[in-house]
Amino acid sequence: MAYKIPNKPLKEKETFAVDTPKGTFKINDKIMIVCKSERTRNGFRHRATLFIDGQEMEHATIPYLNRTWERYEFKSVMKKLVDKSAYLNPQEKQDTNKWLEGDRTDWSDFKRTQQIASLGDIFGQTQKEKNAWKVRMLKAGLGNKGLDIPEDFDKLSETEKKKRLDKVMNVLKEH
């Protein structure tokens, strides 16, 4: 998919290829980093491109054979780009690194899942039905985003299940 990069003087119909829209990180009005993932012969690599005032300035690349843990996708390659940049002054580097260390989590899916799961209190007739609905909706909405329901959860009393599910729902609601 191709996106036009704002403020960059582009030739007619020139575009910059980006794998996903979430690979664009606007740090502030001046600094933007565009990241993409590319396949390689032995694995893949992340590539970050620094834009200052809409002008493409420099790149950084990190190859991977196995995935490393990052708080959010592209964090390592963006940090490498900022740290090596000759185009950012020390204050801009510090501000950008502070931004990179912040929470990049998009909580909208979590909140939506919480809202749908909370309908279990309306649809369910018994506490067991309400709990079952909430568990089903949480698994459907968050199963691939870090939700880990203990194997022995079904063995708990309905009162204990409700207590634990309410805690999860409150965490999701806060964000």
Image (tube, grey):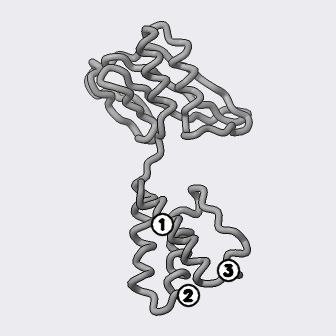
Q: Residues within 10 Å of mark 3 (few under 14, many from 20)?
A: few
Q: Estimate the spatial distance between the alpha carbons at disc 1 and disc 2, rounded to whole Å.
A: 17 Å
Figure disc tally: 3
Quadrant housing residue 143: bottom right
> Which element is circle 1 on?
helix
Q: Which residue is mark 2?
A: 128
Label 3 with label 2: CB-CB less than 8 Å: no
Say what amino acid the circle numbered 3 marks: Leu
Position of residue 56 measured from the top left corner of the image (x, y, whole percent): 40, 17
Position of residue 91 measured from the top left corner of the image (x, y, whole percent): 42, 12
Position of residue 131 measured from the top left corner of the image (x, y, whole percent): 54, 80
Q: Residue at x 55, y 39 (%)?
A: 73
> Which numbered disc, 3 or 2, marks the residue that appears first in the sequence?
2
> Which element is circle 2 on?
helix
> Which numbered disc, 1 or 2, marks the residue that appears first in the sequence?
2
Q: Which residue is mark 1?
A: 169
Q: Residue at x 42, y 54 (%)?
A: 175
Q: Which residue is mark 3?
A: 156
Label 1 with label 2: CB-CB less than 8 Å: no
